[in-house]
Amino acid sequence: MREFDFDAPVERRGTWSYKWHEAEDNDVIPLWVADMDFRTAPPVVEALQRRAAHGVFGYVAVPDEFYNAAISWFHRRHGWDIDCEWIQYTTGVVPAVSVVIKALTQPGDKVLMLTPIYNCFFSCIRNNGCEIEESPLIYHDDATYTIDWEDLERHLANPAVHVLLFCNPHNPACRVWSPEELSRVGNLCIKHNVRIISDEIHCELVMPGHRYTPFGALSPEIQNQVVTCVSPSKSFNTAGLQAAIIVCSDAQLQVKIDRAINDNEVCDLNPFGVEAFIAAYNHGEPWLDALCHYIQSNFNWLRDELLRNLPMLRITPLDGTYLMWVNCSALGMDGDQMTQLLMEKAHVQVNPGSMYGDAGKPFIRINLATQLSRLQEAAHRIITVLSMC
Ligand SMILES: Cc1ncc(COP(=O)(O)O)c(C=O)c1O
C-alpha cells in the first residue's frame, strides 16, 4: 500500500467549504477555486489535533519555532538562506502582497504585472490606489508561455512604474521560471529601479523534472530588490488557517512593511495557523513529494483524455501549480461561455480565464487537486457536452 492515499474519498459537503458551496445540494463537481480535496499531511493534522485538545485559543505570541521552520525549510529544500530579521508574518499571501504594495507605492503609481495572472492581484493594486500596467506573456503555438522581454523593458522604463508584481511559479500560466529568466527580470528591475514583489505561494507545487528557484536566492543584489510573499498553505491545503510570511532583506523597507501590516490590521495569526505552518515545514516533506506526483499523474490523465476526444483544445504544459489552463477558442467559444456551458450542461464548475485579465479570455482553468475518480467523472461529463457542440 502507498504511504499516502490521495485516492481516498473525502466528503467536503457540509464543511462550509467555499469551493464546494455551489455543490452543496446537487451533483456539481467543483474544479475551480484553488484549494485541494485532500486531507493535509498527517503531521499537520496531528499538530492541530493536539492544539485543539488543549481547549484554550487565546491570542498568539508567534514563537521562534515558526521562523526557524521557514528558515530551515528554504535552506534544506531550496538552497535559499533567509535571515530571521527578514521575516514578517501576516494573515495570508494576498494580505502580504497588499501590504507590500502599500509600503512601496504612493496612490497613482503604476504596478506592472505579466498577464494573465492571479485575479486578486488586480484588486490588491486597485485597493491601494495604484494603477495596473500589463505586459502580456507571449503565448506560443505549443501553448507554453514566455516573457516578452522587449515589452517588459519598455514598461519598466516608464518612470510611473515602481513595482513589478511577479508570480513564481505563475498562476495561471503554469510556468516555473528558470534561474536565467529570473536573473534577467531581476537585473532589468535593478537597472530601472523597480522593486519586485514575488508571490511564491505555489513554490512547492512543482512537478517532477522541474525546479523552483526562489527569486531572492539569485544574488544579494536581487535579494535586496525583491520582497517575497510565501506560505505553505497552498501546497499543504491549509489556506483557511491564514498564515503567511513576507521576506525582505532591506531594513528600511521592513519598517514600512511593518507599518503597512499594522495599518491594514493584519498583524495577528491564529494558533491553528501557526501550528500548521510549523508542522508543514518541519515534517511535511514526504507527503508533499507524494502529492506532486499525484497531481502530475492527474494532469497527464486529464490532458490525454481531453485531447483524445477533443483534439482542438490547447492545454498548457504543467511545470507547476495544480491548475490546468485550457484554450477553448477552437470550439468557437471564449472561456466565459465555456464556463457557463460546463456549469449548466455538465455540472462541472471551472474558472473562466477572463478572471486573470484580458489575456486569459479564451481560456478556462481547471483545478486538478482532487481524487482521480472525481476528475474522471468530470472529464466524462465535459467530453459528452463538448462533443455535441
Ligand atoms: C498566486 C496566488 N497568491 C495568493 C493566493 C492566496 O493566498 P492567501 O489565501 O494566503 O491569501 C493564491 C490562491 O490561489 C494564489 O494563486
Image (spheres, rainbow, N blue to C red):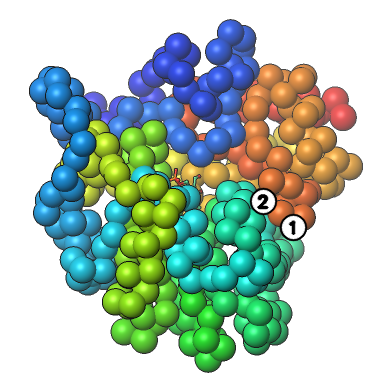
Q: Position of residue 81 (x, y in %)?
A: 22, 71
> Please, is residue 242 above or below residue 12 in the view?
below
Q: Are marks 1 and 2 in contact (CB under 8 Å)?
A: yes
> Please, is residue 223 above or below residue 96 in the view?
below
Which residue matches tag 1? 359
Residue depicted at x 77% and y 19%: 345
Q: Position of residue 67 (x, y in %)?
A: 18, 56
Q: Would you call the spot at circle 2 few (<14 residues within 10 Å), some (14-19), or many (20 or more)? A: many
Given residues 307 and 123, the one toward you in this image is: 123
Element type where label 2 sits in the image: helix
Hey, what amino acid is under mark 2?
A: Tyr
The numbered mark at residue 356 is: 2
Residue depicted at x 56% and y 88%: 192
Quarter of the figure with the N terminus: top left
Given residues 211 and 1, the one toward you in this image is: 211
Res 382 → quadrant: top right
- Calculate the distance from the C-alpha at mark 1 to the C-alpha at mark 2: 7 Å
Res 5 → quadrant: top left
Q: Position of residue 188 (x, y in %)?
A: 54, 86
Q: Is residue 141 visible?
A: yes
Q: Would you call the spot at circle 1 few (<14 residues within 10 Å), some (14-19), or many (20 or more)? A: many
Res 366 → quadrant: top right
Given residues 168 and 327, the one toward you in this image is: 168
